[in-house]
Amino acid sequence: MKKKLLIFLTAMMTMLVLAACGTEDEGTTSTSGTDQKVLKVGMEAAYAPFNWSQKDDANGGVAIKDSKEFAAGYDVEFAKKIADGLGMKLEIVKTDWDGLIPSLQSGAIDVVIAGMSPTPERKGTIDFTENYYTSDYVIVVKEDGPYANAETLEDFSGAKITGQQATTHYDVVDQIPGVKKQVAGTDFGAMRVQLQSGAIDGYVSERPEGISAEMALENIKYIVPEPNFEADPSATAIAVGLKKGSSLTEQINKVLAEISDEERQKMMEDAIANQPAAQ
């Protein structure tokens, strides 16, 4: 009798486990002890004003998974709105830039909200939502440096210029006549250090990062070259990245459609004002 009861109980437990696994939606996981799903958002947390790391939850900071740090910035505010709109719990997963798409494809994260542009190359690998921000290219230089008064791309001839690895920022450096293209930077913090030390004369980024650098650091400015770099419009747009065929794409687009242009601009202004001086 005991043996039969044990077999029965084992069978019932197995059915319950299988049933629980079957209720999980694609790209989400259940939180412990609740039915609420988790939206795992990947970002560098090192690209102010879009996203950065900080020591506390000031200015809306969100705890980073498996870390004592918090993430904040424009992308984090959008991540909050998206998670709320989907009725999900937000989880920030700090991930190196080169690891974002692989992490998405492996299921380690559900979405990328990291200032990522929906370029044709990336669209061949992952899906994207509608754009949630559009910017333009700038070149960040020292205020007292040899290229402080540059106005055109030609004015940067002979300059040591770089951009972040695996981005269009680095690709467009080749459009500068006579440029001395440097090894790609790992992140913007590293490039800012290089610029301040004189190892490079400038780096390419987008306007929000240029404003961020100018506000955070002494003796730094950004220049918008006229005419600007030639690039696909998608290169200066920013969207949420998702795994191919994700069921979340349409749902997130509905959330984004509810956020007005005025609200987006206010979110960016706040992010620029709140960024840490070190980033």
Image (tube, rainbow, N blue to C red):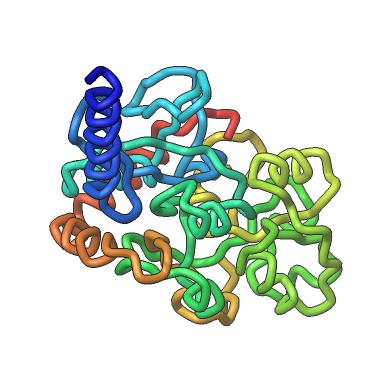
- Which quadrant of the figure has residue 151? bottom right
Name the residue located 51 percent from the left edge and 59 percent from the top edge: 105
Q: Residue 186 in the image: state x and y as whole percent.
A: 71, 49
**Can see residue 82?**
no
Q: Residue 12 in the image: state x and y as whole percent.
A: 22, 34
Please give left or right for residue 91 compared with residue 100 in the image.
Answer: left
Q: Tally the numbered discs.
A: 0
Of residues 128 and 10, which is closer to you in this image? Answer: 10
The image quadrant where one finds the N terminus is: top left
Residue closest to the far front: 1
Name the residue located 52 percent from the left edge and 55 percent from the top edge: 106
Name the residue located 74 percent from the left edge and 38 percent from the top edge: 193
- Which quadrant of the figure has residue 181? bottom right
**Can see residue 181?**
yes
Please give left or right for residue 274 compared with residue 33 in the image.
Answer: right
Position of 28 relative to 120 (above/below): above
Q: Residue 13 in the image: state x and y as whole percent.
A: 26, 31
Of residues 272 and 115, which is closer to you in this image? Answer: 115
Please give left or right for residue 17 compared with residue 213 in the image.
Answer: left
The image quadrant where one finds the C terminus is: top right
Of residues 132 and 37, which is closer to you in this image? Answer: 37
Q: Residue 239 in the image: state x and y as whole percent.
A: 38, 63
Name the residue located 59 percent from the left edge and 60 percent from the top edge: 223
Please give left or right for residue 242 compared with residue 125 in the image.
Answer: left
